[in-house]
Image (cartoon, helix red, strand yellow):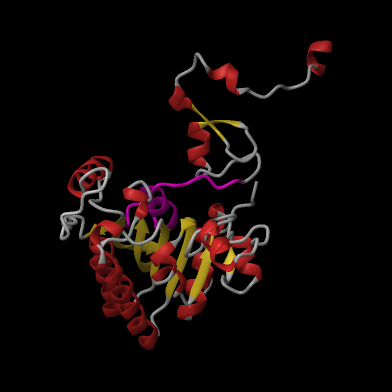
Amino acid sequence: MAWFRKPKTRLQAADRRDLPGELWEKCPNCGEILYTQKLKENWNVCPNCAFHLRLSADGYVALLTDEGSFTEMDADLRSADPLGFVDLKPYRDRLVAAERKSAHGDAVMTGGGTLDGIPVEVGVMDFSFIGGSMGSVVGEKLARAGMRALEARKPYIIVSASGGARMMEGIFSLMQMAKTSAVLAQMHEAGVPYVALLTDPTTGGVTASYAMLGDLNLSEPNALIGFAGPRVIEQTIKQELPEGFQRAEFLLEHGMLDDIVDRRQMKAYLSRSLRHMLGLPPSETLRAPEAA
């Protein structure tokens, strides 16, 4: 009977040395060793501590849109090198290397689909493409998606994950802040809903433009959100920043966000919100799962 009383032991990092690396992932928050497939089934949310690991652009599309409903648009657009930018590595070479990792051509994927039966336009940023930086193609794709939403009068959702403007394109990158903001202003005037979903991290010129202009501004838990980095701010104001500064919870407390939503409940939350904005009856099929 002692065998039945034997305490359960968790898999330690040392135990997985002889196992294929792609089978396991360690939670950066609690240190739990997680089975990769189970983690994916939980939308990259740690089942032990609910820490939100980063999710791919394709993952967000699968999370938010109904199965088989999404059609990608403008996937053929590619960034140019207007400045002939060369730093440690030529910008053209960085673009080629990034394109090998992404099926979407740049740091954002846009298209149309349905969310719990509601027609929507969706833009999802891809942080793996040069840090999700906002270049001319990112701005153009998001602006086109916004215009499609405006013309069809259907809600627009942008999932942001970015280090900010892409410095290798200079003023061409900075002008995307104005371009995307102008389209969103037209949507606002026309009464077409726009939802901004901020994920970890959302910083720089993206935060200073479309990421914070939603009729509803949402964030995932503990997401890093800000314009300049904490070190730059401290050096500028000569003061120590408060604990948790630039995290989603701090921004919610100070009125910069409308809500923080667990990723696993995001689709149900958006369904309720969009149905309220559009004057539609509540969903009869979609229910928010219980948080682990």
117 lies above or below 96? below
The image shows residue 89 at horizontal and vertical percentages of: 24, 43
The image shows residue 279 at horizontal and vertical percentages of: 48, 81
- Residue at the spot x=32%, y=57% of the render? 69
Residue ranking furthest to the bottom: 189
Q: Is residue 277 visible?
A: yes
User: Residue 172 vs residue 273: left or right?
Assistant: left
30 lies above or below 71? above
- Residue at the spot x=62%, y=32% of the render? 32
The image shows residue 79 at horizontal and vertical percentages of: 19, 56
Q: Quadrant of residue 246?
A: bottom right
User: Residue 63 vs residue 235: left or right?
Assistant: left
**Observer-nearest of 64 and 169:** 169
Q: Quadrant of residue 260?
A: bottom right
Q: Which residues are magenta?
A: 51-70
The image shows residue 269 at horizontal and vertical percentages of: 54, 64
**Observer-nearest of 199 and 151:** 199
Most common secondary structure along the magenta stretch: loop
Q: Quadrant of residue 5?
A: top right
Q: Is residue 283 visible?
A: no
**Observer-nearest of 114 and 130:** 130
